[in-house]
Amino acid sequence: MIPLPHVLIVDDDPDILSLLTQFLRQHACEVTVASGGTAMFEALGKGSIDVVVLDVLLQHENGFDLLQRLRAVSSLPVIMLTALAEHTDRIVGLEIGADDYLTKPFNARELLARIKALLRRTSRAGTPPEPEDSRPVLTFGKWRLDVARRELRSDANTMVFLSGSEFDLLLTFVEHPQRVLTRDALMDFSRGSSHLAFDRSVDVQISRLRRKLEDDPKAPHLIRTVRNGGYIFLAKVSRA
C-alpha cells in the first residue's frame, strides 16, 4: 500500500490551519500542524514528514530563521507562505533554501499542486526509488554528484549541502553539459513545466550554486551566463 504524503503545516493562524488541514486530508494527504518552531522540530524529529509548508510571519518567530535552522540539518522540501508580496522577500526565502513560495491569500488547490510538484521532484510521495546501482554518480571537476543519495561531495569527500531545488537544478546542468539552456528549459527540466515560479528565480538558484561550486562566483568557470540565451554548464561530465 502506497503511503500518503505527509505534510507539516507551520502557521499560527488557526483558521488557515483548519482550512488547509481539512482540504489536504480530503485530497489524500496526511497532515500535521504546528503553531511555532518548537512544535515544528518535534514533528520533524519523528522522521515521517515529506514536505513543510512554513509561514514567514509567525507571531513570535520568524519563518526565515526556522528555515535556516532546518536547512542546517535537512534538505526536506519547504514551501514558504507569506503576506508580503515584495520580490525581495521571496528572494530571501530562496537564498536561504526555500523550494517554493506562495503569497497570501492563495488558493488551496494551488498549494496542493505545488506540494505534488515538489514530491514528484524529490520522489518522496511513495514512489519506490530506483535501485542505487542503476542511478549514476556523476563527476565533474573536483565534484561528485551522487544521484541516488542526492549528495554533492568534493574530491576531499566533503559533502556540500544542497536544497532540493538546488540539487535538481545542478542535476539538470550535469545531465546537459556544453549545451545552452534557457531559463524556461531549466525550469521545465528541473521542476516540471507545471511549476509556477516568479521571474528570475532561476537566477537566484544559480547564484546560490555558484557560491557553493565556484572558486570565484563572480568569475564562474562551471556555470557560464550566455547573453540573451540563458546558461551553459562548461565542465566535462563522466559517470563513475
Image: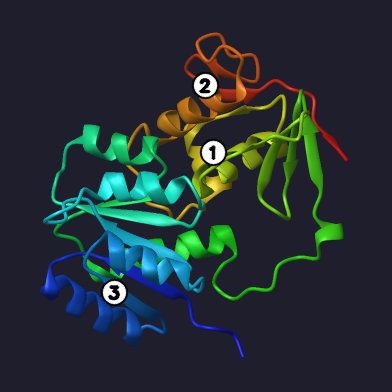
Q: Earlier in the sequence, mark 3 or mark 2?
A: 3
* Mark carried by residue 229: 2
Label 3, label 2: how many angstroms apart (C-alpha)? 43 Å
Describe the colour scheme in one phrase.
rainbow
Residue 137 screen position, x and y as percent? 80, 44
Q: State the image quarter where residue 210 is shown.
A: top right
Q: Nearer the viewer, residue 46 or 240?
A: 46
Residue occupying the far top of the picture? 219
Q: Which residue is mark 3?
A: 33
Cα separation, mark 1 vs mark 2, equals 12 Å
Is 166 situated left or right of 234 in this image? left
Disc 3 versus disc 2: nearer the observer: 3
Assign a secondary structure to mark 2: loop
Query: Is 142 placed above or below 51 here?
Result: above
The residue beneath circle 1 is 186
Tell me if residue 76 comes above or below residue 17 in the rendering: above
Q: Amino acid at mark 3?
A: Val
